[in-house]
Amino acid sequence: MEQFIGIDVGGTNVKFGLVNSDGELLYKEKFKTKKVSEGNFVENFSDILKDQLKRNPSVSKVGIGVPGTVSKDRLTTLELPNIPALEKVPFIRLLKERFSDVVFHVENDANAAALGEYYFSKGAMPDNFIFITLGTGVGGAAVIDGQIFKGGDGNGMEIGHIMSSNGKTIEDNIGKKGILGMALTTLEGYEGKSVLSEMNKLDPKKVVKAAHKSDYLALEIFKDVGRYLGEAIVSAVRLLDVKTIMIGGGVSETFEYVKESMNETIRKYLTPYYINKLDIRLATLGNNAGIIGAASLCFIED
């Protein structure tokens, strides 16, 4: 069975994994992005990759997911706000210079994760779906007729950057910073009892913990998250006329708290043509979606 190396380049960690053609993650390792970025990112990255390839000499294809935009020909990384050391870098050319016998694929990380779901989801997948990932930021992708939808110049479906009803972007509202901002703002002047007011150095994880304890204020925050998520879904569905929505990232832990207000927003703005066939599901690959998705890029024809 063929094996691939999948690499999930993130703002905090760079994760390497060995994945077989059935989508099984055989092992994974992670390295601090800050450490890889010291000096020359590509050289440090290549040194790690060299060790990975040495351990797995049969591997000839490597897929890489990056958190930002890439050139239309998928040879150059463009804008990666969380990894400045990898901005405007002829990434594939530099890797090929060092590993001439290896086939490389690089793709936006949300696109890679969507492709991973398409090939390796635990449930049956249609050929057309929208993929939204909620984490530090908000990422988006779409698979149309079994292919990643890239848009005119290669970087379509940046759903986190569409506008919400309050004049902010979706990511500003419901990325981790947005959720923390909502919590801090809501606490100001709040006179009722809340677990949140008793927590030191509030962060998004603590907001989630408070919701798990049925804290009223935390649940109200996630109602707002659901409303903004619903707005994003409405916009994406109207633009692409695709009715299956996959939602990945950390939202799976809080989906019960967001889905009611999400569905209310969707019902308010979508007509029966869309709603009657709308299928919203949680993604299935969990924390390994980035690595497995990156490996699935190796199925793309060269």
Image (cartoon, grey):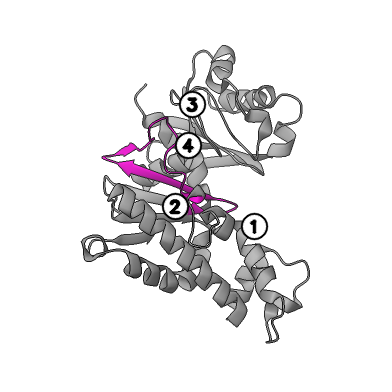
CB within 8 Å, label 1 to label 3: no
Q: Which residues are magenta?
A: 132-160
**Mark 2 and mark 3: span between their CA atoms?**
21 Å
Name the element at disc 1: helix
Residues 30 and 87: in front is 87
Question: Label 4: how many residues lie within 10 Å, few (<14), some (14-19) or many (20+)?
Answer: many
Q: Is residue 114 magenta?
A: no
CB within 8 Å, label 2 to label 1: no
Q: Amino acid at mark 3?
A: Ser
Q: Residue at x 39, y 68 (%)?
A: 265
Q: Residue at x 62, y 29 (%)?
A: 87
Mark earlier in primary sequence (3, 4): 3
Image-quadrant location for residue 46 = top right
Residues 55 and 92: in front is 92
Q: Residue furthest right?
A: 200
Residue topped by disc 1: 177
Residue topped by disc 2: 132
Q: Amino acid at mark 2?
A: Ile
Residue topped by disc 4: 294
Mark earlier in primary sequence (2, 4): 2
